[in-house]
Structure formats: structure tokens, C-alpha cells
């Protein structure tokens, strides 16, 4: 038996009660989260700064405020430079750059 979602296929094996993730499963990380992850991996920001910016973005979204991109939040706080944003966007969206 398996659970089917249009984006993710997760087979469930009842005998061993284990869950196997399909290798072709679609990532559930959204572009803003991925942006922050790339920033951290490149050493541009700390994990705490990423969490702060993502949390601020979510809080504002939930409050019905205008959606702000994580890169803009990080830039506004002085935690990242415009050139770093461009590098990360080039990695995140390679065909666009």
C-alpha cells in the first residue's frame, strides 16, 4: 500500500512499519527556505540569522502584511550584501542567470 500525493510518492511497508521515501520525491523546501539554506552553506549568514529572517517572513505573512523575500529581509538587516544575493539567486535559479 502506498500514499499518493501529486508531488510526493511515499511507499509504506506494513510488515516492518518503515517508510521509504522515493528517490525522485519532490523537495518540500520552498524557494525562500532554499535561499536561506544556500546562504548558510556558503557562509554568508549563520543558521540563527536564517531562522530569524524566515520567522520574520512567516510572522508578517500570517499577519496579512505584504510578503517580503528572505533576501530582502537579510539585506535590510545588514546580514548579507547585494552581490551575495545575486550569487545565491544564480545558484537557486541557474537558467534565469
Image (tube, grey):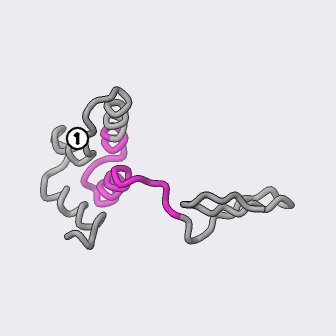
Q: Which residues are magenta?
A: 26-53
Q: Residue furthest right?
A: 15
Kindly state the secondary structure of the residue where label 1 is placed.
helix
Indicate whether 55 appears above or below 1: above
Vertical placement of residue 23 versus 38, above or below: below
Q: How many labels were placed on the picture?
A: 1
- In percent of width and height, residue 21 lies at 64, 64
Q: Residue at x 28, y 66 (%)?
A: 93
**Quadrant of the frame with the N terminus:** bottom right
Image x and y of residue 79, in percent: 20, 44
Image quadrant of residue 90?
bottom left
Judging depth in this view, the residue of 50 and 86 nearest the camera is 86
Q: How busy is the neighbourhood of tag 1: few (under 14 within 10 Å), some, or many (20 plus)?
A: some
Image coordinates of residue 73 in percent, x first then y, are 22, 41
Name the residue rendered at 32%, 29% in the picture.
64
Q: Residue at x 44, y 54 (%)?
A: 29
The residue that disc 1 covers is: 73
Magenta stretch encompasses residue 56: no
| 38 inside magenta stretch | yes
Amino acid at each position: 500500500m502506498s500514499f499518493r500525493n501529486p508531488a510526493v510518492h511515499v511507499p509504506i511497508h506494513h510488515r516492518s512499519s518503515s517508510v521509504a521515501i522515493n528517490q525522485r520525491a519532490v523537495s518540500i523546501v520552498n524557494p525562500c527556505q532554499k535561499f536561506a539554506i544556500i546562504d548558510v552553506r556558503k557562509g554568508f549568514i549563520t543558521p540563527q540569522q536564517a531562522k530569524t529572517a524566515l520567522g520574520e517572513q512567516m510572522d508578517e505573512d500570517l499577519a496579512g502584511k505584504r510578503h517580503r523575500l528572505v533576501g530582502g529581509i537579510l539585506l535590510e538587516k545588514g546580514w548579507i550584501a547585494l552581490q551575495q544575493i545575486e550569487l545565491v539567486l544564480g545558484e537557486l535559479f541557474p537558467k534565469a542567470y
